[in-house]
Image (cartoon, rainbow, N blue to C red):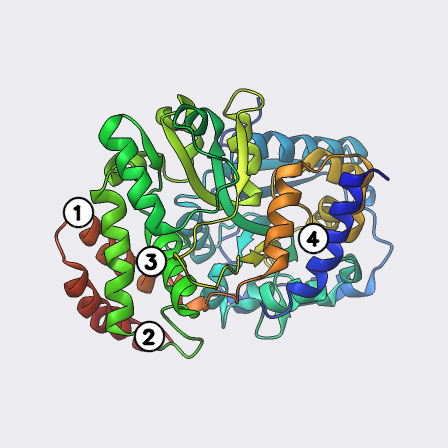
Amino acid sequence: MNKKMVGVSLAFALLASSLIGCTKPSSEQGVAAERASENTETQDVPQEEESEVKETGEFSPADAGDITLRFAWWGSDARHEATLAAMDKYIELYPNIKIEGEYQGYDGYQQKLMTQFAGGTEPDLMQLDYYWNPEWEGQEDLFVNMADTSLVDLSLFQKSAIDDYMTVNGKVIGLPMNSSGFGIMLNKAFFDKHGLSIDTVWSWEDMIEIGGKINAENPNDYLFAIESGTTTGGICPFILNAYQYSKYGHYWADDNGEIVATKEELTDAFNVLQQLFESGAAQPLGEASLFTGQMEQNPKWINGEIGFTVDWTATVGKYKNSLPEGQFAVGRPPFAKEWDNQEIRLVAGMGLGVSARSENVKVATHFANWLMSDPEAALLLGTQRSVPNNSQAFQALVDGGAIDSEISDMLAWAEEAPAAPVPLIEFNSEVGDIAKDICEQVVYGQLTPEQAADMFLTDVQAKMNTVK
């Protein structure tokens, strides 16, 4: 085993302990718009069929007859291609099974999925984000309980990932698909042009000072770019909350649904957010937001006019593939200047769920388990969702030398000092929308940092009181 492989194996072993607590069809094609209308209520879940799954450990899809499954996910083109290749392999193994892919970018995916569930037209299998777990509470029976079927070997997944990220009200609603760390995606062309070291660990304050000078001398160049974002990414989670945690050691909310950041802390964080854009360190928000969820397609990124953005290891592939060979690098995320807290977020938050209302629950569950654990499937999927959480799949990538050094570096940095999990209430869509709106008003100069802090404490808390 070479040095890189040893490093990755150690990284995975550490991950297991550190996570505790803490040209195929387009996206719209193949959507079975006329799913059985009777499957519209939670009580319609075919419980007898689910029980049969539990009792039938040697089930083979080859004996299931001709079946068509729908599988939905979000991601980049590279992830789409990898997933489609794995689907083709499964169809090759079981020619009686047809799988239709429904894929798109992250933006709008959750809303589409929720609408489908409400109308009883959800796909048989779907990629999930643990941020949405609070919105599944009380509706967890919509998913196959992965702890209650012999078609899945949960022992191959990290127990902490199952418990902390995939369990809602005692039911395992999905299989953990990955383990992902947070950091910066860096364009070497920009750093070489401006004489910057790719090994720099940036503070938000240094970004404002140095990025502002670069932009003043080169108006087309921006050290940093980020979109307005969603409830799970963008300026509020990745700047306001990241700065708050780095400097003050806690997020703006707690697990009880209370804002614990003080007015002074929020004013400080909003001031940093405002200065990033006013200084010219960050690309104007309106321009960057044109590339929400696909910053790697931003022309300024491709042309070396943007230095870096922040994102997860699951996205390394798309950023790396967007630049010429050798021009991509990663780094630790920004921290507050001269503060000791340099903890990095590390999650296993992406899951693969199976609808309990599927007419083909057994085949869908068999495919889900195969996709997450089969060595050949693992090699076809690669690291387009960061490294797999399943130990058997992970080992297949290690043996195949298929894990990029950038991913292993980011995971290793996060494992050195993993940050506490962000309270899930911060990702509630209604709470997140209000928080994002306040952040945008600060960036556009419509609110002072002090006014934003006051509004945040009243409006965000009021909404949290209604949803916690």
> Residue most toward the left?
446
If you read the primary sequence from the N terminus, does the residue marked by circle 3 or circle 1 appear first?
3
Nearest to N terminus: mark 2 or mark 3: 3
Residue at the spot 19% in from the left edge and 60% down from the top edge: 449
Q: Which residue is mark 3?
A: 240
Identify the element where label 4 is drawn.
Answer: loop
The local secondary structure at tag 2 comes to: loop
Label 3 to label 1: alpha-carbon separation: 15 Å
C-beta proximity under 8 Å, tags 2 and 3: no
Q: Is residue 394 visible?
A: no
Reading the chain from its start, which is encountered first: label 4 or label 2? 2
Q: Of residues 349 and 447, which is closer to you in this image?
A: 447
Contact (Cβ within 8 Å) of mark 3 with mark 4 = no
For the point 71% across and 33% down, which residue is it? 380
Q: Point out the frontmost of discs 4 and 1.
A: 1
**CA gap, disc 1 to disc 2?**
24 Å
Residue 175 falls left or right of residue 155: left
Mark 1 and mark 3 in contact (Cβ < 8 Å)?
no
Question: Mark 4 touching mark 2, by CB under 8 A?
Answer: no
Q: Residue 168, located in which quarter of the rendered image?
A: bottom right
Q: Amino acid at mark 4?
A: Asn
Q: Give the residue type at disc 2.
A: Ile
Residue on which disc 4 sits:
389
Residue designated by label 1 = 444
User: At 76% from the left edge and 57% from the top edge, which residue is drawn?
Assistant: 13
